[in-house]
Amino acid sequence: MRKLIVFFTALIAVVIGFGLPVTAMAADPAYKVLVFSKTAGFRHDAIPAGITALRELGTANNFTVDATEDAAAFTAANLAGYRAVVFLMTTGDVLNPTQQTAMETYMAAGGGYVGVHAAADTEYDWPYYGGLVGAYFSSHPAIQQVTVRVEDAVHPSTAHLPRAWVRTDELYNYRTNPRSTAHVLATLDESTYSGGTMGADHPIAWCKPYQGGRTWYTGLGHTAASYTEPNFRAHLLGGVRYAAGVVTADCGTTTPPQPPTGTVEAESFSSQFGVQVVDKATAHGGRAVGYIDNGDWLGFSAVASAGATGFSARVASAGAGGTIEVRAGSATGTLLGSVPVMPTGGWEAFQTVTTTLTNAGTGPLFLKFTGGAGSLFDVDDFTVTRGTTPPTPTPTPTPPTGAVLLSSGRPVTASSTENAGFPPSAVVDGNAGTRWSSAFADPQWISVDLGSTKSVSRVRLQWEAAYGRAYRIETSTDNTTWTAASSTTAGDGGIDDITIPATNARYVRVYGTQRATAYGYSLWELEVYGT
């Protein structure tokens, strides 16, 4: 209560410009704010009104606004002159890698970030930004009236607001709920409008310390009228003052509860692509991450990749199964290792898979999911092992009785190789984290020499995301004359476990005639079974 009294003691109202009320705060030191409004996607026509409002707020509150849409402003030297950077309704990919690094350096030095509305519709491929803004945009209904429920009555951006704030705006749904990583200031009451998708807990404004600096975001501010609205202007001013560090506030993050074993709940991710949190009676905590398709991913800003030596995950699948890739820094960062996920017999039938992590990484941990078409599997939780004793990897599925793995470690040749990092030999090394990739053209083939003529009865292919749509399994005794043992024109990636009539062969190859993607053919493992 004392903070609230001090806040209102310092708050006065002045009138400038066209008689619009502008909240003025006493005793702020002079400082500069950079307002950045570059758009590479949808452009909001309220951007000029937002810039005008911020300039007027600055005039009344002792800060200077520099407004730009030139990303060249993002250098370490230039950003150092600003106490806060406002991403005002930016959209799309607005900064190049060098400029992104400058922003990261700025924040690490104690800088401030303010995100307004479409700032959440920005930089989807920059994982750091996902943590900075707190949550990415998902969708929105039509502009309509809503009741905003204020949770924090002390923070300078919400202390002046009624606890039930009724206003009209465009109301964002987000891909994730930021509550686990940010301090929520206000939520939307979905019962007061139509089109909300986040349920009873729908944050719309939040703040947090981040990577050495401070961040504040509001999803409000789509309409030009917002920027002449006294309550919204004061809301925006409070966010700028907090991010600039001229006023303190409790924006400590909320750490989601974790089991005593140190297991990380999959739904505690800080960023994601393509997935949804689902209720699961058999999941730990009653929830899991589901609707996982090929190429989806999760990021965990609170889980470091450095020093990781092993990984285990609790998974369930009544779908195609696939692979969990453990990566460092981003969804396309260094591959630490991977583990196959086989169908478990049902979406409530959880099993644990484990693997060793053999590469070194830095930055936060990411999980990327690959496989065929449709739903792959659900992930309940996972554990990262650190130190010198990694877990025992999940073994390759047991072949049919009487059949043995014939291809392990045998010589392999291929029609082409994308580069030296993806050699043909990777498909027989027993490591589902290494792979062969071909040139980006058709046809392509990869062949394994079994050493002598064997009776071959089964071929198992574990595809990476770049898989074959049409291909043949061929056998040969002399590496010259080939006989097709199996063929498909409707491959869907993931794991293809193919039983063929017992055939005498020394050489077995996969001959691809149609790629499913623009890339080449990419196999984690090629396993040949027989006697």
Image (cartoon, rainbow, N blue to C red):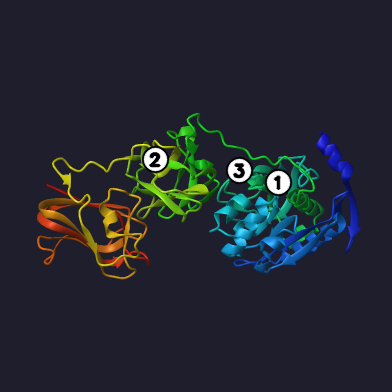
Residue 488, visible in the rendered structure: no
User: Tag 2's secondary structure?
Assistant: strand
Mark 1–mark 2 CB contact (< 8 Å): no
Please give the residue where the numbered disc 2 appears in the rendered image: 315
Three-letter amino acid code at the position of disc 1: Val
Tell me how far mark 1 sits from mark 2, CA to CA.
37 Å
Where, by quadrant of the figure, is residue 417 drawn? bottom left
Q: Which residue is mark 3?
A: 181
Q: CA distance from mark 2 to mark 3?
A: 24 Å
Mark seen at residue 119: none
Residue farthest top in this picture: 260
Q: What amino acid is labelled 2 in the image? A: Val
Image quarter (top left, top right, bottom left or bottom right) of the N terminus:
top right
Whole-percent x, y for residue 453 in the image: 9, 54
Amino acid type shown at disc 3: Thr
Give the class, few, some or many, for how many residues have Cα within 10 Å of label 1's Cα (few <14, many ≥20).
Answer: many
Residue in the picture at 34% in, 37% down: 392
Callout 1–callout 3 Cβ contact below 8 Å: no
Q: Secondary structure at mark 1?
A: strand
Task: Quickly name the residue at label 1.
Answer: 148
Instruction: Report the front residue among 397 and 187.
Output: 397
